[in-house]
Image: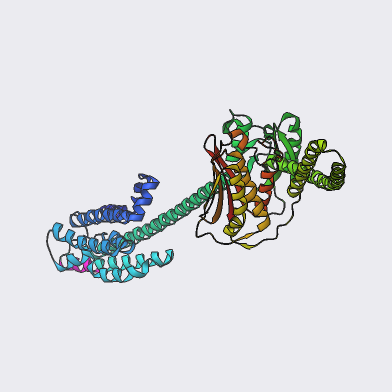
Amino acid sequence: MVALKDILLQMLLAGAAVFLIPLFYLGIIKQTMAKLERTGMMQIGLAITSALSMLLCLLFALHANIGNIPISLSIVPLTLAILYCKPAIGLTLSILHLLYYCLFAHSYNLYGFLVQTGILLYPIVWLSAGRFKHYTRTRKMTMVISITATGLVVASVLCILLMDSNPSLPLFPSILITLGYTLGAIMVAACSVLWIEHMKHYRGLEHHLSEVHHQYISETEQLHQILNAVPLSIATVDKQGNVKFVNDTMEQTAKEQLPCTTTPDLIGHPASQFVEQAQADKMERSIHKALVHGEVDGLTVRYGSHVFQSRTVPIYAFSTDQSREVTGAMLIIQDITELEMLRSELDNVDRLSLVGQMAASITHEVRNPMAVVRGFLQLMQEKSPDTLDHYYRIVLEELDRANSIINDFLSLAQDRIAEKEEYQLHDIIHELSPLLWADANLRGQSIELMLAHNVPKLHLNSKEIKQVVLNLARNGMEAMCEKGVLTLETRVVDDKVELCVRDTGLGIPQAAQEKLFEPFYTTKAKGTGLGLSMCLSIIERHNGTITVESEEGKGTTFKVAFEQ
């Protein structure tokens, strides 16, 4: 009976190294546990408990009751530590096991050393450690049982031989006790391997579940970021038609209509809140089609001054069957207010284009009778007294002015394709400079040319560019008093060639600058208001831009930029 208690107690001590590990797991939070596993601290924990278990087993065997067989089961935790831990840990425990015997043994003899330390088993364990980690669970258990049984059989034989030389127990009970130790060691080893493999499997499943959970959270976050980055208002509703999710664009759209709206105000309420009350029924019917019949539906709705294109799409539950259950719906709402305005403006442009074509045809027809009238007026002037020449001159000047307006209007209205050739902008300016100098001399003004040396050739229509330069230059002269200076400057800025026409006149008010390029807008007493509009039309045909910079009292600069 005493021997049975000793065997059971040693079995508990030998298995303590493994069966206390779950308590260690439960006492540590998951984040700390993962960190310990990455740094190898879990193997160190197993090594510490194994060292303690070996010490207790060895002390119990060395200080056993009188008449008991001094067999230690410390070889079990040592074998498990060598097989499951790193080689450095296994070597340390092996040395520590031998050191325990040297420190706590009463007397030293070869039989006792071999029995208590199991040193004969070390080579077998160490040779098996390298391949052990790649074995299946069944094969691992078979190996551990074989090693443990071999060690205990060797220890039992040595103990029986030792008992024969100094008998304290009969032979048959000794054999039974040693057999009990062997069976106990086998049971402890088998249960320990099962327990360790079960924990490893559990930790593997837990780690896999953690990775799957992390991947799910990561993909969910990516999906939210994608939905928030999409320039569409998106919302999802449940089977009752209540809002479950809104992206940032939807929230922003709702705030534009109702400034005090927040996300909690939108979640859990019917989706018809996104439209005006008069169109709520249309939205609810569209959602009903998606939820009940699985249909994709679209409609155009208005909210205040905004126009939205809404599309309702059913959301299905994941299923491998062909018949899938609708679990909700997604609303995709696009603000098409600007698109509707653009469509309306395009309609207006088409109508204006038609009116322009009609006006161009009418003005073309008007010029013919005007030419006839002018011819007959000249004949009448020749046959009339000289006292009437003043009146004839006024009428002829007004006819010429009307004809000039018609020519400018036709030039503006005809969106013809300009035939371009490679020209040097400086050549066009030099060709115009005599005419410009003549106009400037008549006004008592001067012209300054500041032409850059690195200006490349451009694809231009020389006649149209001459018309632009002449128009801008004469506008600048008319804006200046005597002794004014008109500057024509060319320069290369980034990948563009700029032509600047600068005057020293009184400048243009800010309010007038915004309307300068509108047809028929003029600041001159006798201007037609078509000159700058014609310049803008020509520059746009050359894929360029024209801008104005002016400050009252300091003059005005027109900048024309051409792409190289």
Choose between 107 and 319: the one closer to the eye. 319
Choose between 193 and 379: the one closer to the eye. 379
Is 343 displayed left or right of 228 in the figure?
A: right
Position in image of residue 239 (x %, y %): 68, 39
Q: Residue furthest front?
A: 386
Q: Residue furthest left?
A: 107
Magenta stretch holds residue 134: no
Q: Is residue 514 visible?
A: yes
Magenta region: 157-165
Choose between 562 and 236: the one closer to the eye. 562
Is 104 displayed left or right of 54 in the figure?
A: left
Choose between 99 and 150: the one closer to the eye. 99
Position in image of residue 440 (x %, y %): 59, 46
* For residue 467, above or below residue 261: below
Position in image of residue 376 (x %, y %): 87, 44
Which secondary structure is most common in the magenta stretch? helix
Q: Quadrant of residue 184?
A: bottom left
Report the number of discs: 0
Q: Is residue 319 visible?
A: no
* For residue 407, above or below residue 51: above
Q: How is the image coloured?
A: rainbow
